[in-house]
Image (tube, rainbow, N blue to C red):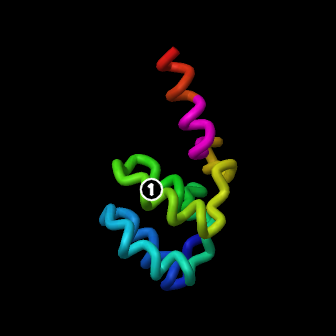
Amino acid sequence: MLSCPEDLRLMRTIGNQNPESVRRPVSRATINEGGRQGETFLIKAMPGEDLRICRVLFNAGADVNRAMITRYSPLTSQLSAQAGAD
């Protein structure tokens, strides 16, 4: 669970949608750690419109297969979106 200050800082920073401000805290965070519902940093970044944040997280080792308690993951989200577009 997100408990160390670096992890909490990164979660807040992702919410600000500023890719440059994500780079510093991502180096100190536990990149695939999840919150109470299993929400990871990558899951938090997915609804944002700036894919550069996702790229920073991928480069830091974020796991696209890491799912929340509800079995939602960034990968399943994209697969569902593509299936709906067909």
- Residue 61 image position (x, y, % from top left): 65, 65
**Under tag 1, what secondary structure?**
helix
Q: Is residue 6 above or below residue 46?
A: below
Q: Is residue 28 above or below residue 46?
A: below
- Residue 72 image position (x, y, % from top left): 59, 42
Range covered by the magenta-colored residues: 72-79
| Quarter assignment of residue 17 | bottom left
Q: Is residue 63 above or below residue 61?
A: above
Q: Nearer the viewer, residue 53 or 6?
A: 53
Q: Main secondary structure of the magenta part?
A: helix
The kind of residue on which mark 1 rests is Ala
Q: Nearer the viewer, residue 23 or 4?
A: 23
Residue 69 within the segment the image draws in magenta: no
- Residue 7 image position (x, y, % from top left): 52, 76
Q: Residue at x 62, y 61 (%)?
A: 62
- For label 1, count other residues whose C-alpha is less than 10 Å away and answer few (under 14), some (14-19) or many (20+): many
Q: Residue at x 60, y 45 (%)?
A: 73
Q: Quadrant of the N terminus?
A: bottom right
Identify the residue at the far top of this view.
86
Q: Nearer the viewer, residue 19 or 10?
A: 19
Residue 74 within the segment the image draws in magenta: yes
Q: Nearer the viewer, residue 3 or 56?
A: 56
The residue under label 1 is 45
Q: Residue at x 56, y 83 (%)?
A: 28
Q: Residue at x 59, y 60 (%)?
A: 58
